[in-house]
Amino acid sequence: MPTRDAPWPPGTPCWVDLAVPDVSAATDFYRSVIGWSFVDTGEEFGHYHVARTNDRAAAAIGPVQQEGQPSAWTVYLATDDADATAKQIAANGGTVLVEPFDIPGNGRMLVAFDTCGGVFGVWQAAGQNGVEIYNEPGSLVWTDARLTDPEAGTRFYAAVFGYTFQPVPGAPDDYGTFQVDGEVAGGIGGMMGGPPDVPAHWLAYFAVADVDAAVDAAERGGATVAMRQQDSAFGRMSILVDPFGATFALNGPNSQEQQSG
């Protein structure tokens, strides 16, 4: 079981959370789809609910901060200095949406737009490192940035986080992986054939043991399917929009692996 008990290297996608108008309904939905249990951090932290797999933090769900705020999953990139990263974001054409602030006992964070308008968070650990379990059913398995201008986006992320990039055989020409300290940390590219009105965004992929069963549970819970499940060189995948309008992806064993298992 891949777990982590130390801060993630700077630039690594290290945490994901969801803002919704109805936390109780959202926890019920994701419990049925991904199998998470939840811990309510209490009134002091706005009833931010930490999703857990095997008693380790996997993600979180919390309330929207203002009326009319759209529901969305936010991917956070690790840093060892949130204030310095905020300056780098602004210096390289991004926009800091929420200035760095402390979450006592946990860390320091900010929220920003990249040069394509994609929203992402930045997390400086100080007590809470981020994802404590990964690449396991019920945990984050991949993230990618889907950008309206991949060339501009890769320049931005390289300048701010020091990413290097490699193409992915069989993927669209504008899609590749990004590396942190020589290790693959996620994907980055164009809009991957999405509708023209979809803005740039980061997409979180969660691992499940059975993608088809998880999609069925999601549809029963009110989700819509943006990409019907299909096998690939990287496992069986589906992209869904939850009942609150937030997009996420599922990943698991391909159909033949399921049958042989």
Image (cartoon, grey):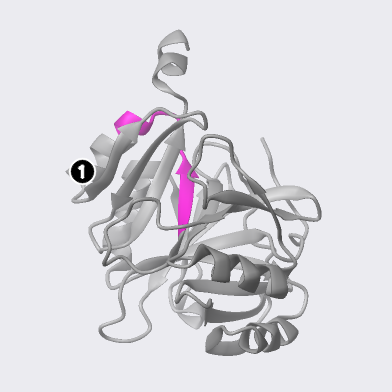
Q: Nearer the viewer, residue 171 or 140?
A: 171
Provide residue 183's location: percent of width, then percent of height.
76, 48
Locate residue 43 relative to residue 92 in the image: left or right.
Answer: left
The part of the chain drawn in magenta is: 203-213
Nearest the viewer among 201 and 136 is 201
Q: Position of residue 5 (x, y in %)?
A: 75, 54
> Where's residue 132, x and y in %?
65, 52
Q: Is residue 94 above or below residue 242?
A: below
Magenta segment: does it hold 76?
A: no
Picture quadrant where residue 7 is located: bottom right
Q: Which amino acid is tagged 1? A: Glu
For the N terminus, give its image quadrant: top right
Q: Is residue 134 left or right of residue 61?
A: right
Q: Which residue is mark 1?
A: 219
- In the rendered image, residue 204 lying in the magenta stretch gets the answer yes
Q: Is residue 120 visible?
A: yes
Report the residue at 46% width, 32% height from top.
252
Depth check, front residue: 72 or 167: 167
- Find residue 165 and report its horizontal and vertical position in percent: 68, 54
Q: Is residue 176 left or right of residue 235?
A: right
Badge 1: few (under 14), some or many (20 or more) residues near its Cα, within 10 Å? Answer: some
Residue 103 seen in the current view = no
Depth check, front residue: 165 or 136:
165
Point out the residue furthest to the top here.
260
Q: Look at 27% across and 69% down and name the residue there.
A: 22
In the displayed structure, would residue 10 be above or below residue 52? below
Q: Secondary structure at mark 1?
A: helix
Count the marks.
1
Residue at the location (69% across, 89% down)?
Answer: 87
